[in-house]
Amino acid sequence: MSQVVKQRMQMYNSPYQRVTDCVRAVWRNEGAGAFYRSYTTQLTMNIPFQAIHFMTYEFLQEQLNPHRQYNPGSHVVSGACAGAVAAAATTPLDVCKTLLNTQESLALSSNISGHITGMANAFRTVYQVGGVTAYFRGVQARVIYQMPSTGAAAPPGMLEALSGFWLKQSVSLAVVL
């Protein structure tokens, strides 16, 4: 629900001044289902994103930190680069999710039913409106958005940092005992 409202309010020339206006209009004009139209696309996007992120992070850790020593810099770099790769690779899914959430008018005019429903319909519509390059619109912004969050706060990086911290704590505790 929040993605639908957020993206519709962010659209150029959005007719909505407040969140409540947007929620009411979507509910009245499209029904409750509009808030969940991109749910399966969101799930479909998150699974490959996490898989790509994890594999890329582990690959980069092997290259940058082969002995797996505590090294926060390698975790940040690996996490940020892994996030960038995962974000770029899953941008077509994000473009389709955004189209499902916003029901953008240019895309709607190319769609016979008047509403874009489901991932397959969104993929077809994106291609019809803008060709292959349309799947990667906004890829730079998506990569730039993901890199800091997956670099500094990446779950693998955080787990590595915490395990390093706890390892140091347990060693100093063992010395005291």
Image (cartoon, rainbow, N blue to C red):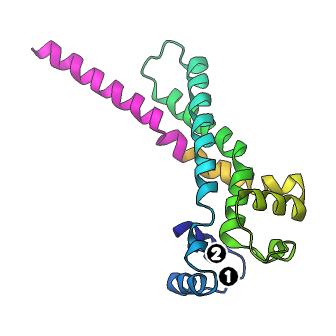
- Magenta-drawn segment: 149-177
* Contact? badges 1 and 2 (CB < 8 Å): yes
Crowd tier of the residue under label 2, counting other residues whose Cα lies within 10 Å: few below 14, some 14–19, many 20 or above: many
Disc on res. 99: none
Residue displayed at 68% across by 72% down: 102
The vertical placement of 152 against 167, above or below, is below
Q: For this rendering, which residue is in front, 27 or 150? A: 27
Q: Based on the displayed image, in which of its 4 quarters is residue 169 positioned?
A: top left
Amino acid type, callout 2: Arg
Residue displayed at 82% across by 71% down: 107
Residue displayed at 67% across by 82% down: 14
Q: Main secondary structure of the magenta part?
A: helix
Residue beneath disc 1: 14
Residue beneath disc 2: 8
Residue 50 placement (x, y as % from top left): 57, 39
Q: Is residue 169 magenta?
A: yes
In the image, farthest residue toward the front: 113
Q: Which SS class for mark 2?
A: helix
